[in-house]
Amino acid sequence: MTKRNRQTRPWRALWLIPVAAVAALSIVATGGGGGGGGGGADDVGAPLVILPSYGFFLTNLNDGAPLTVDVGGEFTVTVDFDGLFIGNVDLNVGVNDTVTFLSYLIHTNESIDITVTSPEGSPLDGSFSVNLTSDIVATVGEPPTSGAFTVVPGPPVAATVTILANGVQLQLGEDEPIDYTWEEYADLLDDETAEIWQRHASLAGGAIQFIIEQFFSVADILDELEAISFSSPFVGTCDMFTGTQPGGVMAQGEFTVTWIGSGELDDGDDFTWEFTQCWDLDDEQLINGTITLQDYTETIDFNTGELLEIGFGGLGANAPGGVIFEFTISETVESDGVWTIPVDGVITVSGGFVMIFQGF
């Protein structure tokens, strides 16, 4: 649930997908509110009031594929939200309503179902559920400090993952628990000498990290959307390759955020977030493709100006929209000043989720 040292072996890839690489915007938000449901703050002349804490809700897209990661064509991991995946976040509101997320909590009893498939078959193929048995608590960008979940089914009983101060503890049924550092826990995913239940337990942690990082990647631009609607499309440059870039890749790529709407930002509007050979120096990874932010929703209290709800998609049974991923993340490796992309170093992300914040 935190980034680890780079490896090219594909099973470890879920632990490596970066939040920084897709959270590259540097726009100053204007504040204010759109004309969203419940009446925008601008309608009454009151400044937008962003609350210090919000609940968040993630769930499957109602009319699309579940969140799926294909790693180099060698295996695919599909994440299916079992109903609503619920938590809350604490944040700090700065100048011009710029938001910094401080910490988050994922509630006990939330669960996801994971399915692993591979073209040639693997011991890890199959389906299992990840069920939270204790709240997962973390500072944003850091490993969790507490929490627990089970991996079901396990052979022959459920495996429990308990988060410690500096790592995790794994236990199969009533067997003696085993302590691991975060690094060791992530390494289990690729360790062919480890037992399958241990590797599934590591994969479960990688999947939770993947969800949280993609969630905050999108959450980080919510306070920028008003500014984007005034200056759409917004085009930004990515990091420039040091040395020689991989063949067929630009030395410096870009990203473009486009508002699909007119007049004022309002419910039902869409955004596209396109990456053109966008390289991230810190993570040494290249992003290509699009994140579609579909069916924007916003509710502001008419009387107080408080932002009560914001996100993409809806929680109703037939509500459309959400966050839709169609991009690749390619690992880049440098040797003697020349960068290359390993054959098994390309990750394809597709599907998505509905994402809603609601005030307490």
Image (cartoon, rainbow, N blue to C red):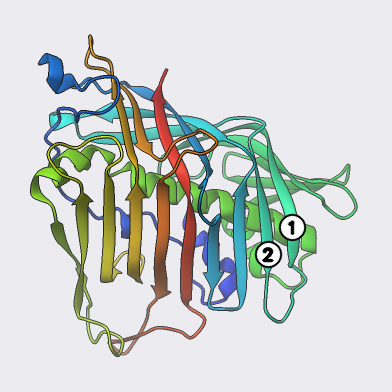
Mark 2, Cα crowd under 10 Å, few <14 / some 14-19 / many 20+, is many
Seen from the viewer's position, the closer of residues 118 and 174 is 118
Q: Is residue 350 above or below residue 224?
A: below
Q: Quarter of the image containing the C terminus?
A: top left
Image quarter of residue 206? bottom right
Q: Position of residue 256 (x, y in %)?
A: 20, 61
For residue 160, what is the image quadrant?
top right
Residue 228 location, x and y as percent?
15, 46
Q: Residue 314: percent from the left, percent from the top? A: 44, 36
Task: Check contact, mark 1 vs mark 2: CB within 8 A.
Answer: yes
Tell me which residue sits at (20%, 23%) in the image: 40
Residue at x 41%, y 75% (from the top left corner): 331
Name the outermost residue toward the top.
Answer: 303
Residue 158 picture location, percent across and down: 82, 46
Using the rendered view, name the quadrant where residue 233 is placed.
bottom left
Decide which of tag 1 and tag 2 comes sooner along the chain: 2
Horizontal relation, residue 259 to residue 195: left or right: left
Is 147 left or right of 58, judged from the image as shown? Answer: right
Q: Is residue 157 above or below residue 298?
A: below
Residue 181 appears left or right of 121: left
Which residue is at a point 51% across and 54% down the rendered structure image? 64
Pick the front one: 234 or 202: 234
Report the disc number at residue 127.
1
Question: Which amino acid type is shown beneath numbered disc 2?
Answer: Val
Badge 1 crowding class, 10 Å Cα cut-off, few under 14, some 14 to 19, many 20 or more, is some
Amino acid type, residue under disc 1 in the picture: Ser
Cα distance in 3D space between marks 1 and 2: 6 Å
Label 2: element kind: strand
Which secondary structure, mark 1? Answer: strand
Residue 229 seen from this side: yes
In the image, residue 344 above or below residue 187: below
The residue identified by callout 2 is: 116
